[in-house]
Amino acid sequence: MKLNGAQILVNSLHREGVDHIFGYPGGAVLHIYDALDSQDDIMHILVRHEQGAAHAADGYARASGKPGVVLVTSGPGITNAVTGIATAYMDSIPMVVISGQVPSPLIGNDAFQEVDAVGITRSCVKHNFLIKDINKISSTIKKAFHIATTGRPGPVLIDIPKDITIAQVDEPTYADTIDMRSYQPVVKGDSGQISKAVDLIIGAKQPIIYAGGGCVIGNAYQELREFTRQLNFPITQTLMGLGAYPANDELFLGMLGMHGTYEANMAMHDSDCVIALGARFDDRITANIDKFCPTAKIIHIDIDPSSIGKNVAVDVAIVGEVKMVLQDLISALKDKKTADISTWWSLIAKWRSVDSLAYKTKEGVIKPQTVIETLYEITKGKAIVTSDVGQHQMWAAQYYHFDEPRRWINSGGLGTMGFGLPAAMGAKLAFPDMDVACVTGEGSIQMMTQELSTMLQYNTPVKIINLNNGYLGMVRQWQEFFYEKRYAMSYMEALPDFVKLSESYGHIGIKVEKEDDLKPAMIEAFKQKDRTVFLDILTDPSENVFPMIPSGAGHNEMLLAGRDKMASTNDEGLNLV
Amino acid sequence: MRHIISVLLENEAGALSRVAGLFSARGFNIESLTVAATNDETLSRMTIVSVGNDGIIEQIVKQLDKLIDVVKVTDLTATEHIERELLLVKVDVDQNTQADIDKQIDEFSAKIVDVSEDTYVIELAGKSRKINEFLDSLDASKILEVSRTGVTGVCQRRES
């Protein structure tokens, strides 16, 4: 049977198990949309902006573990999607983006809606393809999904010229597997390195497990829990790792890094053995690299060899899937006796007693931390929570105690404002029966409000928790600390009436101005199972995120709320972001 | 330290820009880069000369290896290897200078590949250092044009 390129493309996507595509039509992809229209296996979500498509596919992928799929047209279609692709790339999220391209004979002619999509996206995709031959459509799709989902996952772009989607050929035979000589990710860790790691682990007197997003993306949470409990070691997690190990477990010290807990950062600083699992020693984690873990031997387990030794020199490097390496470590440690670490635990108990996440409430003012605690209480900690970027993101990470993986969805690497709302929509489509909340701020939400329209069209009821303090809060916090309170452009005047805004999109809007109204409003919002509810909550404009490691400082130089004078930094610190 | 990195990669459109883009995006330095297809026309061989400390070179090798199109990366500097570069240089020749230029050509075993009324085009293959020395030996004011290929290299032993 003769099929055109568009039909082969859609069939290939179906064979990869794709059930949702997030996209926006345009000239170059009209044939693909035509092919999508004549099938029922794949549901297409029509977003209102291509950046929203990429974030929604990303949220879908983070919640479900399946690759997110995006379909956009040439030119502005793909350039709009770039921020979303870069967001997924920085957090290693599996995604396949299909972009239309002008017809092959016009490529390079500055044709209408032509951009060099492969060139523009090269530095923010794991790989990309320009399909030049209709006979390569099915194999390219196969390769794209293989690359996106294996090794260290990431987005893969396929640029397909319009004429390739129109041409007709006999239906190809679709391959079930793929073998690429140039791409063979390592799965199993080296046994010699594993036994070196075991020696360090059993001798450690002040150990700490530092688990990152790789434990979530690599589905290693069962192994992580078994490994941690087997050793009875303290564990801290990065922003991206939250939920891999349950936050309510006694071995968990909280998040580490710039806004991590006192006990997590102090334990990192004083540790003699750091076990890094699927983490990449990012600058938000290490703080001043010269002051990082001065006395520790470091074991680093990661799927990506280039992450090892990039920022921090390590003592034992194990390249492999965290899940597989942990399985090997668990069995290698079975009959081994570890050192007595009770003194270490009593030191940690002292740090814990500092209670670094404590905050003072104020009469007549809603504290943002209270909002997150209320959200946690009302949802019993079982919601999927997405966030945008800024202070609200840190408070959500600190005060919503994630006990399960894939429940906390945020843009950690790229820090993309506007991510939260479309990501929540994607997560809700993956798990229609779960409560999904988007914690945001009045700054971030305005970067993506148009997706409220998509959410009505596809009935994806999400609860929007808008921490409205009238400021770009994290910018304001840095200006207060480091720029002598010169609040340049961090105050937003002329905010919209968010209640009317959400009502105009067909949703429910509730404004919360008093603390007494907070809990009832939250209960009401979650009672509305089938409606998107926008809670516009006026919070304390002067609140800051603590603890905080100022730029240029070390893990043991944290500032705590209400206990330290205003944060300060030096010139070197100001050069950092 | 100077390293010669040999990269075997899929002979696909865009493979060169992936490598060049990687170097500029991560701030790695490229002294020279040569690329051509191998005896297997589906594969290209790229030879890159870069300068950096061990940590930087390790990152360069790892980041190159991470590119999906790259089949194999070898730091030739870490093994016994042969390196060669080709020079084409055009020089002014007149009665006064000819004898001196001929002497240098002879000394470096270079080759005159083109002669016009008042110019030579000279060819020389060798290690970069030898080419530098040859150029230094010529009267700089007589050099009209220099074109160098950049280094290519091969590991001496049979590779596994």
Image (spheres, coloured by chain):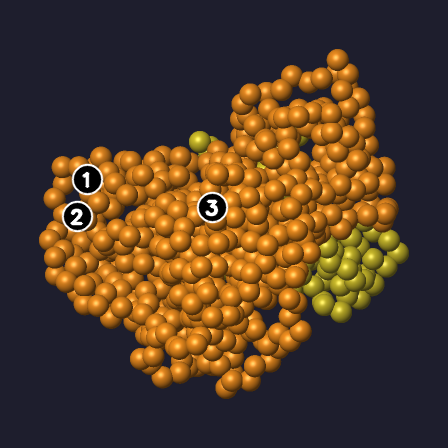
Task: First in sequence, mark 3 or 2: give its number.
Answer: 2
Which residue ends up furthest to the right in the rendered image?
A: B117
Q: Position of residue A100 (x, y in %)?
A: 75, 39
Is there one chain holding both mark 3 and mark 2? yes
Q: Residues within 10 Å of mark 1 (few under 14, many from 20)?
A: some
Q: Could you say which disc has been placed on residue A435 in the image?
A: 3
Location of residue A175 (image quadrant): top right
* Location of mark 2 (residue): A202
- Which residue does the numbered mark 1 point to in the structure image? A333
* Relative image position of residue A79 (x, y in whole percent): 71, 51
Can the viewer see residue B29?
A: no
**Amino acid at the residue labelled 1:** Leu
> For chain B, what colour was chosen?
yellow
Return the residue nearer the eye: A523 or A281.
A523
Q: What residue do we see at 28% from left, 52% from top?
A: A248
Q: How far is the residue under mark 3 from the one under mark 2?
A: 42 Å
Are discs 2 and 1 located on one and the same chain? yes
Q: Label 3 amino acid?
A: Asp
* Mark 2 touches mark 1? (CB < 8 Å): yes
